[in-house]
Amino acid sequence: MSTATRRALMAFLIMLCCAGLAQALKPTIRLADVRALKVNLETAVPKAFGSWQLDTSTSNGVINPQQLEMINKLYSQTLSRTYVDPQGHRVMLSIAYGEDQRDGLVVHHPEICYPAQGFDVISNQMGVLQTPRGDIKVRRLETVAGNSRFEPVTYWTTVGDQVTLGGVSKKLKEMQYSLHGQIPDGLLFRVSSIGRDSAAQFALQDRYVVELLASLNTSSRQYLAGQP
C-alpha cells in the first residue's frame, strides 16, 4: 500500500469516527418535555399583580401577516398584553416561547422586528435589570416611528434556564445543553412603553418587571427570567 493510499485511508477513518461521534452526541432529550411544570404563558403570567392590571381599553397593535407567519414557525406560544397602573402608566408585554432553540431567536429580536414595522432604532445598549432575586442582563433599545411615537424597549432571551443576549454566549449555552444530550427550549421576554424620556420609561419598565417576577411561583419565574 502506497503512502498516499495509507494517508487517504487514515483521513477516511478519521472522518468516519468524527461522524459517528457527532451522531452519538446529537441531543435527543427536549427540555420542554421533561420540565416538571409545563410552560403555559397564558396562565403563568397573571392579569393583575402588584400595582398593575390588564388594560382592556387598548389593543396591542396589528402584526403584519408575514411576520405573524414567521413567529408561528419559530415559537410554540406567544403572549401580548398591555398593563396599566393607578397613575395611568402603561407597559406593553410580549413573550415568545419556543420548544427548540437550536436555530436561534435572532429573526425576532426587537432590533430586527421594530424596523420591519417602520421604527428607527436610535440606540441599542446592554444593561442590567436589578431585582431582589438577582440581576438580569438585558438589552435596552430606543426606538421611534415617524418622529412622533417614542417607544423605549427592554428585553432578554433565555436558552433553557439561562439568560442570554445572543451571539457567542447563546451558542456556548446551546453547546452545554447538547453535551448533556438536551435540546433547550427558550423565550424572548420584551417590555416597552411610550414616552420621550427614555430613562424614565426604562425605570418604569424595571418596576413593572420586578413586580411581575415577585408575583410568580419559582418555576414560572425561572423559565421567564432564568436562574438567578
Image: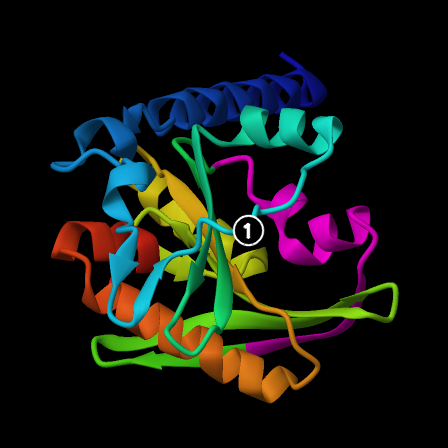
Q: Quadrant of residue 119?
A: bottom right
Q: Is residue 29 magenta?
A: no
Residue 98: x and y, percent? 43, 35
Q: Nearer the viewer, residue 48 or 132?
A: 48
Q: Amino acid at mark 1?
A: Thr
> Would you name the residue on which mark 1 appears?
58
The segment highlighted magenta reads 102-126
Quadrant location of the C terminus? Answer: bottom left
Residue 30: x and y, percent? 29, 28
| Residue drawn where x is 43% and y is 79% of the image | 87
Quadrant location of the N terminus? Answer: top right
| Residue drawn where x is 55% and y is 51% of the image | 58
Secondary element type, mark 1: loop
Q: Would you place residue 64 above or below residue 214 in this image?
A: above
The residue most toward the front is 57
Q: Nearer the viewer, residue 177 or 215?
A: 215
Residue 121: x and y, percent? 78, 67
Q: Would you place residue 148 above or below residue 196 in this image?
A: above
